[in-house]
């Protein structure tokens, strides 16, 4: 599980560092090789999300954007974003595991 995050700055739409810390704990059970980008704003969020399986980019008015496979998936309120990211990572991990098993 490779988590990519920005260093965060005044532009961040949510607390990047705290969020990544929580996600590292909540996703400790994931052993699938995959990537997650957690980026504070649109300066770097969409670009980083292009290269990750699951991404979240902070936005304005208390909400950001969830990306799946490099593409915009849906808007997500900051409230509940951690549960949503965990659910999306778990779903993607199961999908990748199944695909790799089928290819064996
Ligand atoms: S991506 Fe946005 S919030 Fe993160 S360091 Fe860059 S400008 Fe700041």
Image: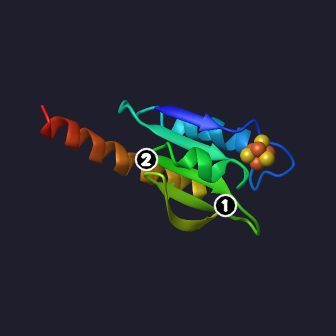
* Figure quadrant of the C terminus: top left
Q: How is the image coloured?
A: rainbow
Outermost residue on the right side: it is 10
From the viewer's perspective, tell me whether residue 4 is left or right of residue 60: left
Q: Nearer the viewer, residue 70 or 66?
A: 70
Secondary element type, mark 1: loop
- According to the picture, the residue beneath numbered tag 2 turns out to be 89
Pointer 1 local density, CA inside 10 Å: few below 14, some 14–19, many at least 20: some
Q: Quadrant of ligand 1?
A: top right
Q: Position of residue 91 (x, y in %)?
A: 35, 51
Q: Secondary structure at mark 2?
A: helix
Q: Position of residue 8 (x, y in %)?
A: 78, 41
Residue 16, located in which quarter of the rendered image? top right
For the residue pair 61 and 103, the one nearer the viewer reads as: 103
State the separation of the CA atoms marked 2 and 1: 17 Å
Task: Please name the residue shown 59% across and 44% down the image.
Answer: 48
Q: Is residue 31 above or below residue 23?
A: above
Mark 2 and ligand 1: say if the CB distance to the nearest ligand atom is below 8 Å. Answer: no
Q: Nearer the viewer, residue 69 or 20?
A: 69
**Residue at 57 percent of width and 43 percent of height:** 37
Q: Nearer the viewer, residue 34 or 86?
A: 34
Q: Residue beneath label 1, please?
A: 78
Q: Position of residue 87 (x, y in %)?
A: 44, 53
The residue depicted at 44 percent of the width and 45 percent of the height is 53
- Which mark identifies residue 6? none
Work out whether residue 80 can be spotted: no
Residue 63 drawn at (x, y percent): 68, 65
């Amino acid at each position: 599980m490779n988590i990519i995050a920005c260093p965060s700055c005044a532009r961040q739409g949510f607390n990047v560092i705290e969020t990544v810390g929580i996600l590292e704990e909540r996703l400790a059970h994931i052993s699938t090789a995959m990537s997650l980008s957690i980026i504070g704003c649109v300066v770097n969020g969409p670009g980083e999300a292009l290269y990750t399986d699951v991404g979240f980019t902070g936005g304005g008015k208390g909400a950001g954007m969830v990306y799946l496979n490099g593409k915009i998936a849906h808007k997500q309120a900051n409230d509940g974003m951690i549960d949503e990211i965990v659910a999306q990572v778990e779903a993607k991990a199961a999908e990748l595991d199944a695909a790799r098993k089928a290819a064996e």
